[in-house]
């Protein structure tokens, strides 16, 4: 049996390279790998189109965040700080097995 891993998908609503439905398909794949994932909770935040996370039976977490506007480039300023903080929180709460 392969160990499950927590997974976070961060996307921009206007990314012309990785379209939001494609990014969402990655989220669904990892939710399936960590199944069952339940207890959907909103993630909140500013300048965010959609933010949710799920707790999974395997003891992992799946995180989904889509930021308004943006592009495929790595963000700067307050959005970069917010993304790095969210990523670090995910890593800290879910260390690798």
Image (tube, rainbow, N blue to C red):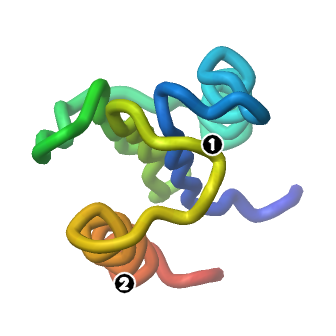
Characterize the local packing of mark 1: few (<14), some (14-19) or many (20 or more) Cα atoms within 10 angstroms.
Answer: many
**Secondary element at image label 2:** helix
Of residues 87 and 59, the one drawn nearer to the viewer in this rendering: 87
Residue at x 48% of width, y 46% of height: 62
Residue at x 55% of width, y 46% of height: 9
Characterize the local packing of mark 2: few (<14), some (14-19) or many (20 or more) Cα atoms within 10 angstroms.
Answer: few
Q: Is residue 79 above or below residue 11?
A: below
Residue 57 seen by the camera: no
Q: Which mark is residue 55?
A: none
Compared across the picture, whether 32 is left or right of 87 comes to right
Compared across the picture, whether 84 is left or right of 18 comes to left
Mark 2 = which residue? 92
Instruction: Please identify the residue farthest to the top as the structure is shown.
Output: 21
Mark 1 = which residue? 34
On the rendered image, what quadrant is the C terminus found in? bottom right
Q: Is residue 57 above or below residue 94?
A: above
Residue at x 86% of width, y 59% of height: 2
What is the x, y in percent for residue 96? 61, 82
Residue at x 30% of width, y 34% of height: 52
Q: Is residue 70 above or below residue 1?
A: above
Q: Quarter-wise, where is residue 78 in the image?
A: bottom left
What is the x, y in percent for residue 49? 28, 26
What is the x, y in percent for residue 33? 73, 39
Q: Are marks 2 and 1 in contact (CB under 8 Å)?
A: no
**Secondary element at image label 1:** loop
Of residues 2 and 76, the one drawn nearer to the viewer in this rendering: 76
* Mark closest to the chain's N terminus, 2 or 1: 1
Query: Mark 2 against mark 1, which lies toward the viewer?
Result: 2
């Amino acid at each position: 049996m392969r160990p499950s891993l927590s997974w976070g998908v961060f996307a921009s609503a206007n990314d012309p390279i990785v379209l939001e439905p494609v990014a969402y398909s990655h989220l669904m794949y990892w939710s399936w790998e960590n199944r069952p994932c339940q207890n959907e909770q909103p993630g909140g935040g500013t300048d965010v189109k959609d933010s949710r996370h799920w707790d999974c039976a395997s003891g992992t977490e799946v995180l989904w965040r889509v930021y308004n506007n943006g592009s495929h480039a790595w963000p700067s300023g307050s959005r970069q700080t917010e993304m790095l903080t969210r990523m670090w929180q995910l890593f800290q709460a879910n260390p690798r097995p």
